[in-house]
Image (tube, rainbow, N blue to C red):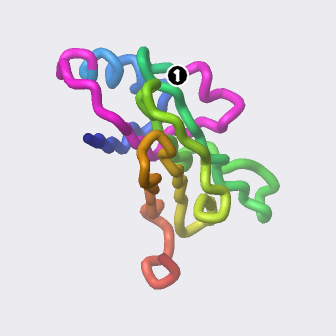
Amino acid sequence: STFFLNIDGNSSNFDNFATELSAIKHKFSIIGLAETNTDPENGNLYQLNGYSSCYQNRFFCSMKNQVKPKGTGVCLYVKNSLNYCKLDSLSLCTDYIETLFIKITSFQDPVTIGVVYRPPNGSIDQF
């Protein structure tokens, strides 16, 4: 089973999300989040018991020479009982789309799953 949420910032909403998720009493196999505003280097600050996390790099704006501070960042939380690898060839972050894909290898036939996010200011035509 899967679950998706636009978290609108891990720093301000992750604790509430984790609390509400634990109240559901169901262990989803995969949890996808968008707008984490978190890079892989800081993903370990936001852990869910029983899951490993995989964060995508956030959008780097070359015109401003900085990482976009808000409204960016996707991640997947994968149940610890599942083995997976990140699919770099399908995972990208641009000004119009952010994706993160993994291949779950715990089954006889591997399964590919991902999270795809279009930022509100992202071009629908390019998406």
Locate residue 36, reporting x and y percent.
50, 38
* Along the line of sight, the residue nearer the viewer: 125 or 66: 125
Q: Residue at x 60, y 45 (%)?
A: 85
Helix, strand or loop for disc 1: loop
Which residue appears at 18% of the width and 18% of the height? Answer: 25
Q: State the residue position of label 1.
A: 46
Q: Is residue 112 left or right of residue 100?
A: left
Q: Quadrant of residue 91?
A: bottom right
Q: Up-down: is 24 above or below 118?
A: above
Confirm whether the magenta stretch covers residue 44. Answer: yes
Outermost residue toward the bottom in this view: 125
Whether the magenta-drawn stretch holds residue 34 is answered as yes
Q: Is residue 41 visible?
A: yes
Q: State the quadrant of the N terminus.
A: top left
Residue at the (53%, 65%) spot, across then down:
97
In percent of width and height, residue 117 lies at: 44, 58
Amino acid marked by disc 1: Tyr
* Disc 1 residue crowd, few under 14, some 14–19, many 20+, Cα 10 Å: some
Instruction: Give left or right: position of 38 versus 107.
Output: right
Residue 113 showing in the rendered view: no
Q: Nearer the viewer, residue 23 or 118?
A: 23
- Furthest-front residue in this view: 108
Q: Which residues are magenta?
A: 22-46
